[in-house]
Image (cartoon, rainbow, N blue to C red):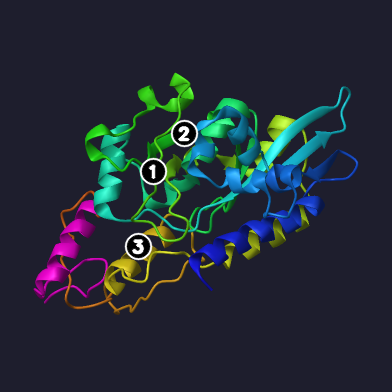
Amino acid sequence: MSSFEQRVGLTNMVEKYLQELFPDDKCTIKKFGCETILGENTDTDFWKFIKEPEANQQASSMIVKFAPDFLLLKKSKPSKLYFVDVKHSIAPTWAPSRLKMLKEKNGDNKLSTDRVGVVAREALLAYRRYYPSTIVLMACPYNAKLMMAQFAKDIRCLYCYHSTERDDYDCNSCPSKTGGFFDLERDVNSEGSQTPMTNVDLNSFRPADEFFLNELGIRLNENILNNLLGEIKRESIEIGETVEPKLKNLALWNINHAGCDWVDYEVYSFPGNDFYHLDRECICMRGYEDRMVAYATLAQALNSGKKTYCRICCPKPE
């Protein structure tokens, strides 16, 4: 299964649970979105235009293209109507250089792999501008919350993809504030659709059950929610086929130790000490307060072929 098929499968799986997740006596949920508006037959002039990059620079087409997936009608007095959109994030941002950049841009030294989610850049722009009260449901197998929710306007943006490094987007010049649009560009370094992405802070989301209870007064079906969380835990985490196996294993270690104990990594324990062994050709991390700095040093050591040691993955040297 390709990574694109996995992402589509995860979204479809979450959508499958939605009808049962919400109590019938409290609310009604109905399919919405671009497919409902334009129809499933994609061989039409409307669909052909929507798929063009230029559709991302017109308000009318963005309203249609990024229309939220569902309508949620709360049966209160008076009744209230909400937009709900289902998102997923299965590819963690783990590379030391990327995390370092995100920390510096946001002035947040505590940013970690499990906190960084991914959303299509133009989709988040459309929600913030045209559907600010949309409830975004995010499924993420590398975050301890697993299934989380937040209003689009309250999602913290960390970084928007831009192909030109000298002219980075920042929050002050974001099109969602200026009224403009992003450039017509593709993320050529990305697999699949090459859709430009936005990194978001998953700490700005709340657990789904907590969000709906506190914001809408709706208690989700606990059994159905637990089944859904179990399904998300079983989803594969996409780190990349070309990533050095040792570094991939350390990324999984980092995610596991951030509260995601369902994420497996290769570990060999040694009696009498607290050290683990992944590979003897690694770097000693003792003295590094920032684990990601240590990972960067580890990457350099692996590339150099030097035989060094690490307190996380090697037995204590004699």
- The three-letter amino acid code for the residue at tag 3 is Ala
Q: Quadrant of residue 85?
A: top right
Q: Residue at x 34, y 70 (%)?
A: 249
Residue 142, given in percent of the width and then of the height, sits at 48, 57
Q: Residue at x 36, y 71 (%)?
A: 241
Residue 160, given in percent of the width and then of the height, sits at 39, 38
Residue lying farthest to the front in this orientation:
45
Q: Nearer the viewer, residue 229 or 7?
A: 7
Residue 149, given in percent of the width and then of the height, sits at 61, 41
Q: Is residue 275 visible?
A: no
Looking at the rendered structure, the secondary structure element under dot 2 is loop
Q: Earlier in the sequence, mark 2 or mark 1?
A: 2
- The three-letter amino acid code for the residue at tag 2 is Arg
Report how many numbered discs are placed on residues in the image: 3
Estimate how packed mark 1 is, as few (under 14), some (14 to 19) or many (20 or more) residues with alpha carbons within 10 Å. Answer: some
Q: Which mark is residue 251?
A: 3
Q: Is residue 278 visible?
A: yes
Residue 225, given in percent of the width and then of the height, sits at 71, 54
Is the Cβ of the residue at disc 2 closer than 8 Å to that at disc 1? no
Q: Residue at x 39, y 48 (%)?
A: 186
Left or right, residue 142 beside residue 314:
right
Q: Which residue is mark 1?
A: 185
Magenta-drawn segment? 292-318
Q: Which mark is residue 142?
A: none
Q: Which residue is mark 2?
A: 156
Left or right, residue 309 beside residue 183:
left
Q: Earlier in the sequence, mark 1 or mark 3?
A: 1
The mark lying in front, picked from 1 and 3, is: 1
